[in-house]
Image: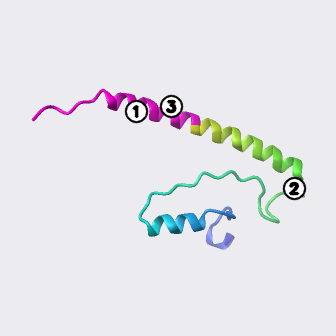
Amino acid sequence: MERDGCDLVGMTGMPEAVLARELNMDYACLAVVVNWAAGKSEGIVSMEEIERQLEDGMLKVRHLLTTLGEMLNRLSESLSDFQLPNE
């Protein structure tokens, strides 16, 4: 897969993406990479390193989702004040 330009291969997500497409649904995946494939890291990956990567990644996920939630709340509030003109 590296020859095809892939940087990483996920262990999950494909069944969901296929089903969403079949149902004509929008789909997005937010993933945290904590353990590169065999031969892709510079040495042996310890469980401690995986746990540290997971913790760091989840902090970023929480920040992203919190920011997105705040943005959606502001958008919702601004749209609730919007009224169409009477026709």
Q: List the residue tagged with mark 2.
A: 45
Residue shown at 56% from the left, 64% from the top: 16
User: CB under 8 Å between callouts 1 and 3?
Assistant: no
Amino acid at circle 1: Leu
| Residue 70 disc label | 3
Depicted 54 relative to depicted 18: above or below: above
Depicted 24 relative to depicted 34: above or below: below
Are there few (<14), some (14-19), or many (20+) residues within 10 Å of tag 1?
few
Residue shown at 41% from the left, 64% from the top: 24
Determine the secondary structure under disc 1: helix
Q: Nearer the viewer, residue 59 or 69?
A: 69
Which range is magenta? 66-87
Task: Choose the circle earlier in sequence order: 3 or 2.
Answer: 2
Q: Nearer the viewer, residue 43 or 13?
A: 13
Are there few (<14), some (14-19), or many (20+) residues within 10 Å of tag 2?
few
Where is residue 60 shown, x and y percent of the image? 66, 39
- Tell whether 31 sits left or right of 85: right
Nearer the observer: mark 3 or 2; the answer is: 3
Amino acid at circle 3: Glu
Q: List the residue tagged with mark 1.
A: 75
Separation of residues labelled 3 and 2 (CA atoms)? 36 Å
User: CB under 8 Å between callouts 1 and 2?
Assistant: no
Separation of residues labelled 1 and 3 (CA atoms)? 9 Å
